[in-house]
Amino acid sequence: MTDHPPPSPALLPAGMRDLLPPDAETEAMALAALMEVFASHGYGRVRPPLLEFEDSLLAGNNAALAEQTFRLMDPGTHRMMAVRPDMTPQVARIAASRLGGAPRPLRLSYAGTCVQVSGGVLETDREVSQAGIELVGADSAEADAEVIAVGSEALAVLGLRRISFDLTVPPLASTLITEFGLPEPDRAPLLRALDRKDGAAVQRHGGALAPVLNALLLAAGPAARALEVLRAQPLTPGARALADRLAAVVAAVERRAPGLRPTVDPIEFRGWRYHTGVCVTVFAAARHEELGRGGRYVGPGGEPACGLTLRPELLLRAAPARPTRSRLFLPFGTAAATAQAMRAQGFGTVAALDLAEDDLAEARRLGCTHVMRNGRAEAL
């Protein structure tokens, strides 16, 4: 028999991690700043539960989330429950059920933790934080633009200004291919070629539609140029309607947020599983991971909606470092009124629980930045 040492209590499942001081406080403060921006634009906060019954959470279009969902059995009802991998479907459910009678358009915000079976391509975290907004009951370019503009303002509060908002229309490619009447055997390989940005394969499988599709592939970039290419192409009626909506959204974004310079990839559709119109992905300069994404979809009961979900922990990696709260050591016996006054000035006070031989040494040992001496805070 071999004796194996017990696992370390610090060992966590793959993709899970503890967030320690000061990072946890920094994230909480950043999250509060995001939510304040959302609230200032009239988005009321909701808080869905971490667990729901599986047949509710994964109903309808949400079935696309099944492969990223942890499941467990409710010992009380013996029904299967699911841990949310994404908060957007929950907010849509709340809008359609508990807030079904609320006036439209309905503006909702949310923040919380989600758990996914596996991390994304560029990350390993399985426990992820989300903060976002949903605009329910409005189907217009102005609604799409509002979500993008509010998201941009929220990012600016965190000091993120070199941000790219990349717009796309996931249904455009499939709509164009279907309405053009391309033979069924060619459709799947053509969509794969478009997904891989493989112009040669598009040429092989696209038939008479290949020149149009390759032109759209090459159009990705600044919005003005991409829209010019779209206008020049002989699109089918459904595809033309989607392209016109994209142009209207770009114009609305430029009116609401003149400093934004959105880019457009008209043929991108990877990862957009239930979206039906213009969508957006958010990136920061010189970083590869997505800071957020969102777009237009149809909620329960066929209600139009659009939204944007941001990832606070990724935002903080890209944002300038935020100052942490200064820690002030209070020698034993410091008056409560003095301590309160220092907290009102923004200090985090660390009160000695008994007399210390050396207050300065004790302050340094406890990670303080200041010490209370002669009635005022002195920097260490």
Image: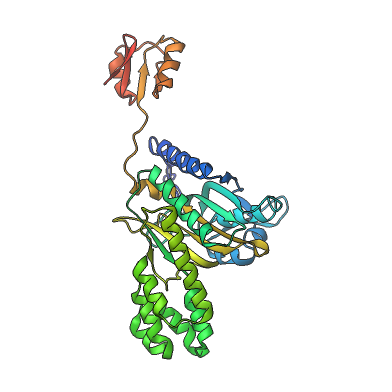
Residue 177 vertical position relative to residue 337 in the rendered view, above or below? below
Residue 255 vertical position relative to residue 243 in the rendered view, above or below? above
Lateral position of residue 100 relative to residue 64, left or right: right
Residue 103 in the image: state x and y as whole percent: 67, 51
Snapshot quadrant of residue 59: bottom right
Taking the spot 43% from the left edge, 63% from the top edge, the residue there is 250
Q: Nearer the viewer, residue 141 or 100?
A: 141
Residue 254 vertical position relative to residue 362 in the rendered view, above or below? below
Taking the spot 37% from the left edge, 85% from the top edge, the residue there is 211
Q: Nearer the viewer, residue 354 or 324?
A: 324
Snapshot quadrant of residue 300: bottom right
Q: Nearer the viewer, residue 256 or 203?
A: 256
Extreme front residue here? 255
Residue 288 vertical position relative to residue 129 in the rendered view, above or below? below
Placement of the C terminus among the 4 image quadrants: top left
Taking the spot 31% from the left edge, 21% from the top edge, the residue there is 370
Residue 5 in the image: state x and y as whole percent: 41, 45
Lateral position of residue 65 relative to residue 223, left or right: right
